Image (cartoon, grey):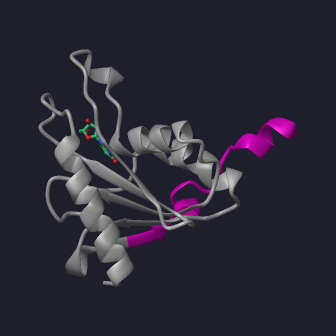
Amino acid sequence: MSTERESLVAVAFEAARSAYAPYSQFPVGAALQFDDGSVVTGANVENASYGLSLCAETVALAKAMNEGRRGGLVAIAVAGKDETPIMPCGRCRQMLSEMAQLGHTDPVVWSGTGDDAVEVRLSSLLPLAFGPDSLDA
Ligand code: THU
């Protein structure tokens, strides 16, 4: 496993400590790496109305957008309860794709550690993605 991948996955694990997940007992952390070297993290936020819960990736994405970021997303790490890899849900793939498309990047998505580690491109998780440019058609 590359050092870069190891360290971003470790940041995602650390971020999971901030999760509010009393219903699922499944804390998740996400770490978004930008091309200026900065990292924005998020953790899932659940709600007594279960369906309203926010995933870690969406929380991180919203934080980054609110910091004024509009592109430059180069890597995404996701960490769950243990070292088993987990990939972003469908909604989060779409949310993350917005930032990727704004900056014309195709971020690598990392999860898990050791032999189980997964490395894929966001475009392969969400092929033929709808995005900002689609509205111009
Ligand atoms: N969850 C995430 O935060 N990210 C994922 O990639 C998968 C699922 C959260 C949603 C919910 O709070 C908990 O994990 C169990 O589904």
Position above or below: 124 against 134? below
Residue 29 in picture, x, y percent from top left: 28, 50
Q: Is residue 47 left or right of residue 130?
A: left
The verdict on residue 2 being magenta is no
Residue drawn at (30%, 72%), measured in percent from left and top? 7
First to last magenta residue range: 119-137
Residue 39 in picture, x, y percent from top left: 42, 58
Is residue 128 something that shows in the picture? no
Residue 4 in picture, x, y percent from top left: 38, 78
Residue 26 in picture, x, y percent from top left: 16, 42
Residue drawn at (29%, 66%), measured in percent from left and top? 9
**Farthest residue toward the right?**
137
Q: Is residue 19 left or right of residue 40?
A: left
Position above or below: 17 against 108? above
Give the quarter the ligand 1 occupies. Answer: top left
Position above or below: 131 against 51? below
Q: Quadrant of residue 50?
A: top left
The image shows a total of numbered marks equal to 0
The verdict on residue 135 being magenta is yes
Instruction: Specify the quadrant that holds the C terminus.
Output: top right
Is residue 126 something that shows in the picture? yes
Position above or below: 112 against 58? below
Residue drawn at (68%, 53%), measured in percent from left and top? 101
**Farthest residue toward the bottom?**
2
Instruction: Specify the quadrant that holds the N terminus.
Output: bottom left
* Front-most of residues 118 and 95: 95
